Image (cartoon, rainbow, N blue to C red):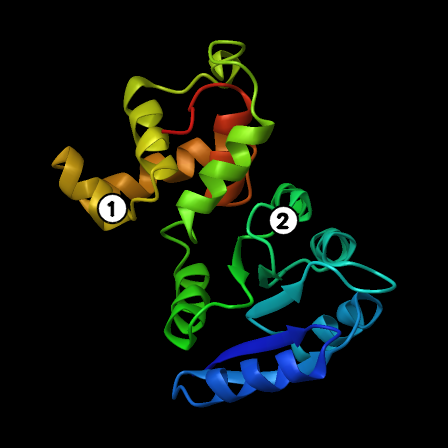
Amino acid sequence: MSVKVLLVDDEELIRAGLRAIIDAEPDLEVVGEAEDGTEVLPLVTRLAPDVVLMDVRMPVVDGIQATRHILDRVPAAPKIIVVTTFENDDYVYDALRAGANGFLLKRARPAEIVRAIRVVVAGDSLLFPEKIRLLAGRHGLEPGRSGLREAGLTDREAEVLRLMATGLSNVEISERLFVSVQTVKTHVGNVLSKLHARDRTQAVITAYESGFVTPG
């Protein structure tokens, strides 16, 4: 079955370019388009996309608000990738904090766009973690302020979280720790549960903001 993608951008040219790239892939399919965040919720409800490519800046309802609307009102919410012109834009970080799964630059190459969609659907790695680290580093607390002590992570769970923050996938973490992929998945699930995070991106943002992990 194809991965269904919804495009949300106020520029028709951007949407047309994304559609051409995505529809050229045998396992991906654009099922709808919107030019403002006001149109997103009805389309998500009707079309049930797997992934939404969401422009951050739109004239009426921006990508941050639209992301919150989806996650608040759609039980089986799609993955959301925010699309932006500026990689260090505070809007991007706000969208990630609102629940977006990752982000893309509008100047990304076609192969990067396709890979991004597949990464968020798989859910076992971060999307462009180096950019997330830069953004988180500008917003995080001083090291040692909290350290997530209240979360009650075991030593192994803490180690897995640190490796997640570097952008390693479950397979890469399993190779690093010499344990099975299933064991890593169990640890990741425990980390998400203890941090009350909906996905890896949210867990890593929490880790940076608490001072548990620092950029570099």
Badge 2 element:
helix
* Residue under the image location 84 percent in, 67 percent down: 38
Q: Is residue 203 visible?
A: no
Q: Residue at x 78, y 58 (%)?
A: 62
Q: Is residue 83 above or below residue 152?
A: below
The three-letter code of the residue at mark 1 reads: Gln
> Residue 110 appears in which quarter of the rendering?
bottom left
Q: How many residues crowd around disc 2 within 10 Å: few (fewer than 14), some, or many (20 or more)?
A: many
The answer to whether residue 128 of the structure is visible from this angle is: yes
User: Pointer 1: what residue?
Assistant: 182
Give whichever of discs 2 and 1 has the lower sequence position: 2
Considering the numbered disc 1 on the image, is that residue within a helix, a strand or a loop? Answer: helix
Foreground of the two, 81 or 170: 81
Which circle marks residue 92 in the picture? 2
The amino acid type, in three-letter code, at marker 2 is Val
- Tell me residue 49's x, y (percent): 60, 74
- At x 74%, y 76%, the residue is 43
